[in-house]
Image: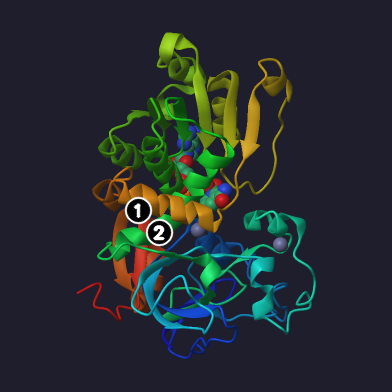
Amino acid sequence: MRGLAYFKKGDIHFTDELREPEIEADDELIVDVAFCGICGTDLHEYTDGPIFMPKDGEKNVLSNKSIPQAMGHEFSGYVAKVGPKVTKVKVGDRVVVEATCSCVDLHRWPESKHYKTPACNACKDRCDNCCEYAGFMGLGVVGGAFAERIVTIEHHVVKLPDGFPMDVAALIEPLSVAWHAARVSKFPPGKSALVLGAGPIGLAMILVLKAQGASKIIVSEPATMRRELADRMHVETFDPSTHGDKSVAMLRSKTFDGKGFDFAFDCSGVPATFNTGLQAAHYRGTLCNVAIWGSGFDFNPMGITLLEKDVTGSIGYTVQDFAEVTEAFKDGKIDIEECKHLITGRYRIEDGWEKGFLELMNNKATNIKVLLSPNNHGELD
Ligand SMILES: NC(=O)c1ccc[n+]([C@@H]2O[C@H](COP(=O)([O-])OP(=O)(O)OC[C@H]3O[C@@H](n4cnc5c(N)ncnc54)[C@H](O)[C@@H]3O)[C@@H](O)[C@H]2O)c1
Ligand SMILES: [Zn+2]
Ligand SMILES: [Zn+2]
């Protein structure tokens, strides 16, 4: 099978020798991939990895699988084959797949050392994303969707409406990251929000907050092209690089009575965005950290205590988020045309390394989401 695979740090390349996935558990199904987005995490595996991927000679704790492995975890596709216990979808259905792997998947892998271990407490509570063993398909647990086909279990699958555009469907994954952040931070309709950073996640956050009835959204982003994209989503933008120390005061002055924001979402992950988000939130306001941090920084907790602010964090998503994002599309709360602004490239997996990974690493400011396709359905024609 054809695909773009992770071989080791500094070596991701196209191969036509990937093992064809097979149904081994009764609730598994095969999905024929339509489109799969390249994520910043994929780039990190190349430059700084293996992070999620197993190290050379080691195996993944959940699946007992090793590398090389096809990457890709943000994808859409068509159901190609179903196991005997699959009832949620049928062959030919358009689907998206929630890519977390957790205790929910353990029954698929008798070779795993945790095969007979009871589900962890998080999985028992249906918080699969907080699983003790959590990992992602396409990031070390099992082969991902920069390939012709993948195998998953029906638990992870959400059916799309007939005719749903499959390129936009590949964005349901980053939208679910943002949806989950709004959900765990308990964002209610009618509240104001500051989004820090307008990369793929910040832009997805804008679309989700709009869908959830935010009264006001301001996006802080230094890169011009990314601010322009946010403009096209009809939200107010702010360039922090031109206001320096005055950024917090400037941002607060744009809110009702200069009170500050009800919510701030850090979708960037540098000390300046965390501090700006915290200070721009009003008393008892909420800062949600969506960003992934490589290391910590000096921080005074009195910034939380004195005005009784809530600081929370959000990791990944569950299949509930995928289902709710799909419903939001059906209800017209997320606009398909606005989502298309996020797609800055669509290429065959054969060209994925040069036109996808290298382009994203070399020209970050002018790219948002690059999609790859095995093109088995003529999606690129
Ligand atoms: N929590 C999760 O489950 C989850 C999932 C996916 C990604 N992430 C993380 O979310 C973050 C965003 O992801 P992304 O792919 O959009 O990354 P990205 O690097 O493309 O976007 C970050 C943006 O922040 C902007 N920025 C830099 N300094 C800034 C400042 N001082 N003020 C405002 N903006 C500033 C950058 O110009 C950039 O556009 C990353 O840390 C990523 O690892 C988290
Ligand atoms: Zn991702
Ligand atoms: Zn678990």
Q: In the rendered view, tell whether residue 342 sits above or below residue 108.
A: above
Residue 151 position in % (x across, y down): 51, 79
Tag 1: Cα neighbours inside 10 Å, few (<14), some, or many (≥20)? many
Left or right: 189 in relation to 347:
right
Q: In the rendered view, tell whether residue 78 sits above or below residue 288.
A: below
Q: In which quarter of the image is the C terminus?
A: bottom left
Residue nearest the observer in this picture, 97 or 301: 97
Which numbered disc covers residue 367?
A: 1
Residue, disc 2: 360
The quadrant where residue 76 appears = bottom left
Residue closest to the far left = 381
- Residue type at tag 1: Asn
Residue at 55 percent of width and 53 percent of height = 317
Residue 354 appearing in the image: no
Residue at 43 percent of width and 31 percent of height = 220
Left or right: 246 in relation to 342:
right
Q: Which secondary structure lies at badge 1? A: loop
Which numbered disc covers residue 104?
A: none
Give the image's coloring scheme. Answer: rainbow
Residue 15 appearing in the image: yes
Tag 2: Cα neighbours inside 10 Å, few (<14), some, or many (≥20)? many
Residue 182 position in % (x across, y down): 51, 39
Left or right: 157 in relation to 33:
right
The quadrant where residue 159 appears = bottom left
Do the numbered discs 2 and 1 sit on residues whose CB atoms are within 8 Å?
Answer: yes
- Residue type at tag 2: Leu
Residue 270 position in % (x across, y down): 57, 38
Rounded to the nearest angstrom, the CA distance separating label 2 from label 1 is 6 Å
Residue nearest the observer in this picture, 349 or 108: 108
